[in-house]
Image (spheres, helix red, strand yellow):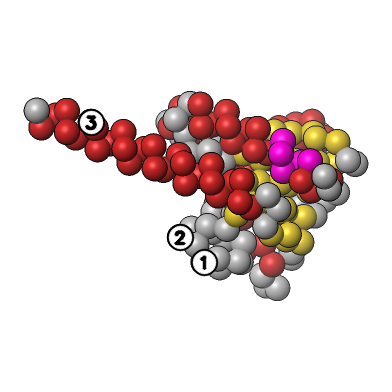
Amino acid sequence: MTQDEKYMKAAIKEAKKAYALAEVPIGCVIVQNDKIIARGYNKRNTQGNTLAHAELNAIKKASKKTGDWRLEDCTMYVTLEPCQMCAGAIVQSRMKKVVIACMNPKAGCAGSVLNLLQMEQFNHQVEIERGVLEEECSTMLSSFFRDLREKKKKEKKKREE
């Protein structure tokens, strides 16, 4: 197992915590000097807060741990391509690199819809690596949304009875 796979497995573990709370299973870890310094998972519904994305939760913890908002020597591992809000926060935090499991063609801002992480106009660009444990993460997300659709279908059927 590569280092990237090891840390992505840790991000997947975080995503599973979100899944257990019926949250979209997105997980994230931030690594500095070959050590996980922060973990985060999606808690939007649980906290009733738009800002409670996995990446933002992890960035907040990493900044607290390092005592600095600059995370220049850190790498983020995330199970799904960051949205525009998270991509912006990643650039603002001066993150060195982001390793992404699967891309998000509908809302991803690390290359799918656009690439905020590597815009030359910004004063910082982030290295990107894509596809680490992609299949495992993609399967987990597909299962979550399939289960969600089935649950909604059952609820609708129940209301109609």
Does the magenta segment cover residue 66?
Answer: no
Query: How many numbered discs?
Result: 3
For the point 77% across and 41% down, the residue is: 7
Extreme residue in the right direction: 33
For the point 69% across and 59% down, the residue is: 130
Q: Which mark is residue 113?
A: 1
Q: Please state which amino acid type lies under the numbered disc 2.
A: Lys
* 2 and 1 marks in contact (CB < 8 Å): yes
Q: Nearer the viewer, mark 3 or mark 1?
A: 3
Q: Which mark is residue 106?
A: 2
Of mark 3 and mark 1, the one earlier in the sequence is 1
**How far separated are the C-alphas under marks 3 and 2?**
26 Å
**How far separated are the C-alphas under marks 2 and 1?**
7 Å
Mark 2, secondary structure of its residue: loop
For the point 59% across and 46% down, the residue is: 137
Residue 126 rendering spot, x and y as whole percentages = 74, 60
Which residue carries the number 3 mark?
155
Image quadrant in which you'd find residue 115 = bottom right
Q: Please state which amino acid type lies under the numbered disc 3.
A: Glu
Q: Quadrant of the C terminus?
A: top left
Q: Please state which amino acid type lies under the numbered disc 1.
A: Val
> Viewer-proximal residue, 156 or 57?
156
